[in-house]
Image (cartoon, rainbow, N blue to C red):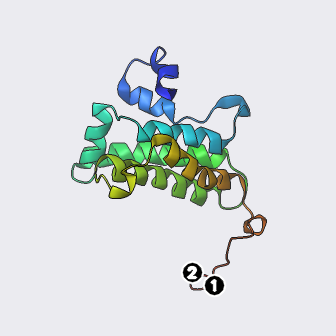
Amino acid sequence: MLLDRYHSHVDSVPALFAVAVQLPTGQERGAGEHLLDVLGVRLGELPPETRALVRSMLTVPEAANSMREFLDERVENLARSLDGDDTRLRALITVSGILGLTITQHFLRLQAFDGATHDEVLRAAQGWMASLASDNLETKPEARRLDDHGRCS
Protein backbone atom coordinates (compact mmCIF):
# COMPACT_ATOMS: atom_id res chain seq x y z
CA MET A 1 0.00 0.00 0.00
CA LEU A 2 1.17 3.54 -0.72
CA LEU A 3 1.09 4.57 2.95
CA ASP A 4 3.37 1.68 3.89
CA ARG A 5 6.04 3.08 1.55
CA TYR A 6 6.25 6.29 3.58
CA HIS A 7 5.45 5.08 7.10
CA SER A 8 9.05 4.63 8.20
CA HIS A 9 10.03 8.10 6.93
CA VAL A 10 7.26 10.22 8.48
CA ASP A 11 6.57 10.86 12.18
CA SER A 12 2.88 11.79 12.24
CA VAL A 13 -0.31 10.77 10.49
CA PRO A 14 -1.04 14.32 9.23
CA ALA A 15 2.48 14.47 7.77
CA LEU A 16 1.95 11.04 6.26
CA PHE A 17 -1.31 12.26 4.69
CA ALA A 18 0.53 15.21 3.15
CA VAL A 19 3.41 13.09 1.85
CA ALA A 20 1.04 10.59 0.26
CA VAL A 21 -0.33 13.22 -2.11
CA GLN A 22 2.99 14.75 -3.16
CA LEU A 23 3.69 14.22 -6.82
CA PRO A 24 6.78 12.12 -7.43
CA THR A 25 10.00 13.83 -8.41
CA GLY A 26 11.97 12.86 -11.47
CA GLN A 27 8.78 12.27 -13.48
CA GLU A 28 9.24 8.49 -13.29
CA ARG A 29 5.45 8.30 -13.30
CA GLY A 30 2.78 10.54 -14.69
CA ALA A 31 0.33 12.62 -12.68
CA GLY A 32 -2.56 10.32 -13.60
CA GLU A 33 -0.83 7.24 -12.23
CA HIS A 34 0.17 9.05 -9.06
CA LEU A 35 -3.37 10.34 -8.56
CA LEU A 36 -4.73 6.81 -8.85
CA ASP A 37 -2.41 5.94 -5.94
CA VAL A 38 -3.74 8.94 -4.01
CA LEU A 39 -7.33 7.90 -4.73
CA GLY A 40 -6.47 4.37 -3.63
CA VAL A 41 -5.28 5.75 -0.29
CA ARG A 42 -8.46 7.82 0.11
CA LEU A 43 -10.66 4.82 -0.67
CA GLY A 44 -8.85 2.78 1.98
CA GLU A 45 -9.25 3.22 5.71
CA LEU A 46 -8.68 6.84 6.74
CA PRO A 47 -6.54 7.62 9.79
CA PRO A 48 -8.59 8.94 12.75
CA GLU A 49 -6.99 12.39 12.48
CA THR A 50 -7.97 12.67 8.82
CA ARG A 51 -11.52 11.50 9.56
CA ALA A 52 -11.82 14.12 12.32
CA LEU A 53 -10.49 16.89 10.09
CA VAL A 54 -12.80 16.06 7.18
CA ARG A 55 -15.79 15.64 9.50
CA SER A 56 -15.23 19.03 11.16
CA MET A 57 -14.08 21.08 8.15
CA LEU A 58 -17.57 22.49 7.54
CA THR A 59 -18.28 23.51 11.12
CA VAL A 60 -14.97 24.39 12.76
CA PRO A 61 -13.14 27.41 11.30
CA GLU A 62 -9.71 26.09 12.26
CA ALA A 63 -10.42 22.77 10.53
CA ALA A 64 -11.74 24.61 7.47
CA ASN A 65 -8.59 26.75 7.31
CA SER A 66 -6.34 23.73 7.70
CA MET A 67 -8.16 21.78 5.00
CA ARG A 68 -8.28 24.81 2.67
CA GLU A 69 -4.52 25.36 2.98
CA PHE A 70 -3.83 21.68 2.45
CA LEU A 71 -6.10 21.43 -0.63
CA ASP A 72 -4.83 24.71 -2.11
CA GLU A 73 -1.32 23.31 -1.83
CA ARG A 74 -2.43 20.07 -3.53
CA VAL A 75 -4.03 22.05 -6.39
CA GLU A 76 -0.89 24.13 -6.94
CA ASN A 77 1.37 21.08 -6.73
CA LEU A 78 -0.72 19.19 -9.28
CA ALA A 79 -1.09 22.19 -11.60
CA ARG A 80 2.70 22.52 -11.80
CA SER A 81 2.93 18.96 -13.10
CA LEU A 82 0.40 19.44 -15.93
CA ASP A 83 0.64 21.05 -19.36
CA GLY A 84 -1.81 23.41 -21.02
CA ASP A 85 -3.67 26.63 -20.44
CA ASP A 86 -6.17 25.30 -17.91
CA THR A 87 -3.84 23.35 -15.62
CA ARG A 88 -5.03 25.06 -12.45
CA LEU A 89 -8.68 24.36 -13.23
CA ARG A 90 -8.01 20.71 -14.10
CA ALA A 91 -6.04 20.37 -10.88
CA LEU A 92 -8.88 22.00 -8.93
CA ILE A 93 -11.46 19.64 -10.42
CA THR A 94 -9.26 16.62 -9.73
CA VAL A 95 -8.46 17.52 -6.11
CA SER A 96 -12.13 18.36 -5.49
CA GLY A 97 -13.20 15.10 -7.11
CA ILE A 98 -10.90 13.02 -4.91
CA LEU A 99 -12.21 14.84 -1.84
CA GLY A 100 -15.76 14.23 -3.05
CA LEU A 101 -15.14 10.51 -3.51
CA THR A 102 -13.56 10.38 -0.05
CA ILE A 103 -16.58 12.06 1.53
CA THR A 104 -19.19 10.06 -0.37
CA GLN A 105 -17.55 6.74 0.48
CA HIS A 106 -16.45 7.24 4.08
CA PHE A 107 -19.00 9.69 5.45
CA LEU A 108 -22.14 9.62 3.31
CA ARG A 109 -21.69 5.96 2.43
CA LEU A 110 -23.41 6.23 -0.96
CA GLN A 111 -25.10 3.02 -2.03
CA ALA A 112 -23.25 3.17 -5.35
CA PHE A 113 -20.16 1.96 -3.48
CA ASP A 114 -21.99 -1.17 -2.26
CA GLY A 115 -20.66 -4.22 -4.03
CA ALA A 116 -17.90 -2.27 -5.79
CA THR A 117 -14.41 -3.39 -4.90
CA HIS A 118 -11.57 -0.99 -4.30
CA ASP A 119 -9.96 -2.13 -7.58
CA GLU A 120 -13.19 -1.66 -9.55
CA VAL A 121 -13.50 1.94 -8.38
CA LEU A 122 -9.87 2.60 -9.29
CA ARG A 123 -10.33 1.01 -12.74
CA ALA A 124 -13.39 3.18 -13.33
CA ALA A 125 -11.36 6.27 -12.33
CA GLN A 126 -8.48 5.53 -14.73
CA GLY A 127 -10.00 7.46 -17.64
CA TRP A 128 -10.64 10.46 -15.45
CA MET A 129 -7.06 10.48 -14.19
CA ALA A 130 -5.60 9.81 -17.65
CA SER A 131 -7.54 12.78 -19.04
CA LEU A 132 -5.30 15.04 -16.95
CA ALA A 133 -2.49 14.39 -19.40
CA SER A 134 -4.39 15.98 -22.26
CA ASP A 135 -5.15 19.67 -22.50
CA ASN A 136 -6.84 19.28 -25.89
CA LEU A 137 -10.50 18.23 -26.11
CA GLU A 138 -10.02 17.51 -29.82
CA THR A 139 -7.94 14.43 -28.92
CA LYS A 140 -10.99 12.92 -27.23
CA PRO A 141 -13.54 12.00 -29.91
CA GLU A 142 -16.33 11.59 -27.38
CA ALA A 143 -15.79 15.09 -25.98
CA ARG A 144 -18.51 17.59 -26.76
CA ARG A 145 -18.05 21.32 -27.04
CA LEU A 146 -19.72 23.78 -24.70
CA ASP A 147 -21.56 26.79 -26.08
CA ASP A 148 -21.22 30.32 -24.64
CA HIS A 149 -23.71 29.45 -21.89
CA GLY A 150 -21.85 26.33 -20.69
CA ARG A 151 -24.25 23.88 -22.35
CA CYS A 152 -23.15 20.92 -24.47
CA SER A 153 -23.71 21.46 -28.15
Position of 132 relative to 18 (above/below)? below
Residue 118: x and y in percent read 46, 41
CA distance for labels 2 and 1: 5 Å
Residue 91: x and y in percent read 57, 53
Residue 58's image quarter? bottom left
Residue occupying the point 51% across, 46% down = 120
Q: Amino acid at mark 1?
A: Asp
The residue that label 2 is drawn on is 150
Residue 119: x and y in percent read 51, 41
Residue 107: x and y in percent read 28, 49
Q: Would you say 44 lies left or right of 32 here?
A: left
Position of 71 relative to 142 (above/below)? above
The residue that label 1 is drawn on is 147
Under tag 2, what secondary structure?
loop
> What label sits on residue 14 in the rendered view?
none
Residue occupying the point 75% across, 69% down = 141
Residue 32's image quarter? top right
Position of 120 relative to 146 (above/below)? above
Query: Front-most of 106 and 89?
Result: 106
Instruction: Say if mark 2 contacts mark 1, CB within 8 Å.
Output: yes
Query: Front-most of 84 and 100?
Result: 100
